[in-house]
Image (cartoon, grey):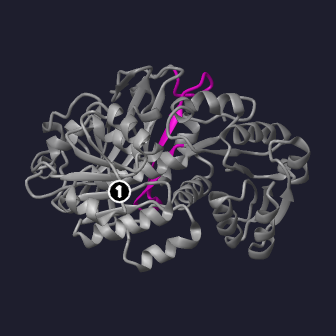
Amino acid sequence: MDAQRFVVMGAGQVGFHLARLLSQDGHQVTVIEADADRRARIDEELDVLVVGGNGAHVPVLEQAQVDKADLFLAVSSSDEANLAAAHLARHLGAARSVVRVAAAEGVIGHRRVYEEVFGVDLMLSTQLLTTTRILNLLRGHTTTAVETFAEGKVELRKVEVEPGSLLAQRPLRELALPAGSLVVAFFHGDQLTIPSGDDHAEVGDEALIVASSEVIAKVERLVTPRPAVVGTIVIAGGGSTGQTVARALHGGDYRVRIIERDRARASEVAAAFPRFQVLHGDATDLSLLKAEGIDRAASFIAVTGNDDSNLMASLLARDLGIEMVAPLVDRAETFELWQRLGLTRVFSPRVLAYEHIAEYIASGYSANIVSLSHGDAVVVERRLYEASPAAGVTLAEISPPRGLIVGAVVRGRRVFVPRGADRLEVGDVVILFVRKEELATVQLLFPGRDKAGRAA
C-alpha cells in the first residue's frame, strides 16, 4: 500500500495502538492528544507528529493539517467529541473519517443517521466488535465466523460442512432454505467456489450463508447434522459488555450464569435477564466458583472491566478444567503476558479496532466490508441512492456477473433474497458477495457517497 497521511485524535489504548502500527507501515501519522503525559509517551515511543489540544476545536485540527489527511480517525474516549471532530475535519477538507464509539447500542443502532449528519464514513464500536468476536465462539461447534450487516438485520455465517450435512448430500436447489436466506459460497481449503443450484459441498468444506437475523439460526440447524451442545456459559462481569453478550444469548436456547461483584448491579442484571442465573460475588473467588459448580461450565467469558480481575478469573476457570476460556484485555502492556500464560483466546478492543480499520483502508475505503479467503472475495453492504445505476432496475436487467451476488436486500423492516424480477429501490440496503475481480462492478452499480452527498 502506498504511504498515506493519517490524523489520529485520541492517544488512549486504541489510538496509541493505531498510531504505532500505521506509522510502522510507513504512513505519515499525526496524533492529536490533550493529555501532556500521553503526549510525552508518544514522543518517546512513536515516530509520529504530535499536536496538543482538543481535537474537537478547529485551530487544533488546522494545526494537525487535517485538510491533507487521507483519513481522520476520531478514537478518543468521548463519543460526542469524536462525532464533532469528525464533522469538523471533513468540513476542513479531510478526505474521509472514522469514528469510534464506546457503546454497542444506542449510537450504533442509529449508525446511518449519525454517519449522514456528521459526515462519517465508517463508525465502529469497540464494544460491539468485542462482543461479536465473543459470540463467534459461543454460537456452536459448526460456526467458524459470524458477522452482522444492516444494523443487525442480516447475518453472515461461515459453517463447517460435517458428515451428514444436507449441504454435502443434496444440490442447493433441493434444500428448500427458509425465505430470506442464501448460500453464496463454498470454501474448499484455499479454493473459493460460487455455487449454482446444481452444486453441493463436500465434507470438510465451509459454506457461507447470508440470511435475515430472524431465520439464520433455523438455516444453520437445517444444514448441521447434529445440534450444537454449547453447555453452560459463564459471564464474569455484569457491566455493559457482559450485558451485551447476555442480551445476544437471551433469545436462544442457552444456559447462562452471570457473576457480578456489585450487589445493586447484580439485581439489575437479574431483572433484565430473568431466564439466566445471576450470582452476586467475585469471579476471582475460587471458593465461590467451586461452591457454585462453575467447573462444570463449558465456556467462561471474563469481561469485568478490570484486566487483573479478568486475568485471575480466567486462570482459575482454566485450572478448574473449563474448556473454553476467553478474557477481555484493555491494557496493551498485559496482552503478551496473557498469551504467555496460555490464555490464547484473549479479546483486545484495540486490536479488533485496528484490524477493522486496517481492513477498511486496505479495501480502498469501502465501509461495511468483510474480507474472505485472504482477500479473494468480500462481503459489502451498500445503500442505494438516487444516482445509483442499480436503483429502479430489476436484478435481471442488471445481469450481475457470477462473481457478484446480491445476497440480501433490506427494505425497511423486510429482508429478502432478490430474484430476477425483483426491482431494487432507492433507500434499499443491499448485501453483496463479491469476488475481488468484480469490485469495480460494485463501485459502478452500487457507489457510495461523496462529501456532497452524491453517489460516487
Residue at 49 percent across and 24 percent down: it is 428
Identify residue for label 1: 301
Return the x and y of residue 163 as percentages of the image width and height.
10, 58
Residue at 48 percent across and 50 percent down: it is 129
Compared with 137, 251 (above or below) is above
The stretch in magenta equals 368-391
Return the x and y of residue 429 as percentages of the image width and height.
48, 29
Compared with 389, 28 (above or below) is below
Total count of labels: 1
Q: From this viewpoint, is residue 212 visible?
A: no
Assign the C terminus to one quadrant of the image: top right
Q: Is residue 307 left or right of residue 24?
A: left
Q: Is residue 197 left or right of residue 94?
A: left
- Quick check: is 329 in the magenta stretch? no
Secondary structure of the residue carrying tag 1 is strand
Assign the N terminus to one quadrant of the image: bottom right
Residue at 84 percent across and 52 percent down: it is 68
Return the x and y of residue 354 as percentages of the image width and height.
58, 59
Quarter of the view holding residue 376: bottom left
Q: From this viewpoint, is residue 380 visible?
A: yes
Compared with 177, 192 (above or below) is below
Return the x and y of residue 284 as percentages of the image width and height.
37, 63
Q: Nearer the viewer, residue 332 or 152?
A: 332
Residue at 40 percent across and 43 percent down: it is 263
Tell me the kind of residue under disc 1.
Ile
Q: Nearer the viewer, residue 54 or 115?
A: 54
